[in-house]
Amino acid sequence: MAELGDFVAQGRRKNCEVTLEMMDYKHVDTCSDVPELRSILQALKSGEHGKYPHLERHTEKRILGLLPEKDRKKIEALASTPSAQDVADAANDINAFVGESKEDDDRLRTEVYVKKGGKQLPPVRGRKAVPVTKEVSKPSPEELEAKKENRIPGYDFRAWDKYDVDRECEKLDDKEKAQEEARKRRAREARERDDAKARKALEDLAKCRTELGCDDLAPAERQFLARREKNKGNEAYRASENRDAYDSYTRSLAYDASSAVVFANRAMACLRLGLLERAEDDCTCALKIDPSYHKARQRRGMTRHKRGKYALAIEDFERACADDPDNLALRKLLKQACDKFEEVEGKKAD
């Protein structure tokens, strides 16, 4: 077991040579430099100049007397022998910890936490996977009764003679038509929202156009300034100065709002700045100007994916893949959007 001197000697020591004159009671009593006293104590304990146990204990007491009370009590507690009560308390704490750990291990072996709609994690190496029973929603008694009433038994030939197949097919057709009309209505409403956002983006540019005095400039001058601001924005974007890039692209659009490329470039700056809604609006504006602009559709799909609009992101990625079928990165983005849609909605994308 470690002695008191072992703990006292721990700490910063003075980098000096310990001479025989320093290993003296008088020098130890007059010295108030704790690092130097530690060096002396270390030399005494090494036995290089002989063994002086009384001088060692005297040096230890001198160091303890110079240390702050907090450090002194800590060293004395470390050097003291634990009582029977301390040993019993420590044993109880260890036993309680072992018991809790065993309970946690047993619970983790028997319980499998699977996120709803998510994928089951693989088992721990060397252990068999615990089978997970899927929760199946049971129909209510009313639903079972309604199914029984509508169901025609196989042996009831008279009822089968009265069964109108054409009518039932018409019902299915009407249901499919209603679903298709609802899908078209949602798509139309989404397009109307996109158009409204595009108009608002152009209105915001009108304010910047007024501040820059674009109306007083000749068309050729506006085109020159628009190209210059676009180039400045590209340089700032490459230097990761995203706010400056956004401002430069905005001024370029104020001079000339007919460039789909600048709208798409500003969308990328918005993505870096975390302005996801503005990025989606800029991509929509770019596609309004040039519906065949492939990069704008791809970037809008990325923005919608980040915003959790997985169905709309899938639509953009599918159209982008149709325009560029050999692009593996696009296909990977499409797969990620489909996987997220299935995870969130609980069904595969149409």
Image: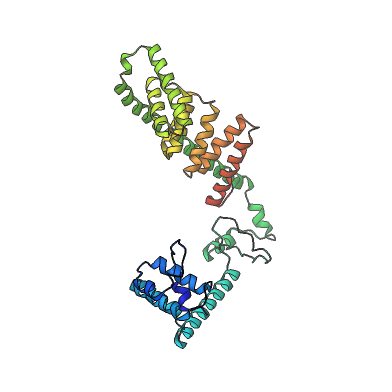
Task: Indicate whether 254 appears above or below 336.
Answer: above
- For this orientation, the residue located farthest to the front is 21
Picture coordinates of residue 341, whole percent (x, y): 55, 47
Picture coordinates of residue 342, whole percent (x, y): 57, 49
> Would residue 239 be found to the left or right of residue 332 on screen?
left
* Residue located 69% across and 59% down the image: 154
Image quadrant in which you'd find residue 169: top right
How many numbered discs, if any?
A: 0
* Residue located 36% across and 11% down the image: 218
Is residue 233 visible in the rendered image? The answer is yes
Picture coordinates of residue 142, whole percent (x, y): 52, 64
Q: Foreground residue, 87 or 260?
A: 87
The color scheme shown is rainbow
> Would residue 38 be found to the left or right of residue 135 on screen?
left
Task: Indicate whether 56 appears above or below 215.
Answer: below
Task: Indicate whether 21 appears above or below 339.
Answer: below
Q: Foreground residue, 165 or 206?
A: 206
* Residue located 67% across and 60% down the image: 156
Picture coordinates of residue 271, whole percent (x, y): 46, 37
- For this orientation, the residue located farthest to the bottom is 84
Is residue 284 visible in the rendered image? The answer is no
Q: Foreground residue, 138 or 60?
A: 60
Picture quarter with the C terminus: top right
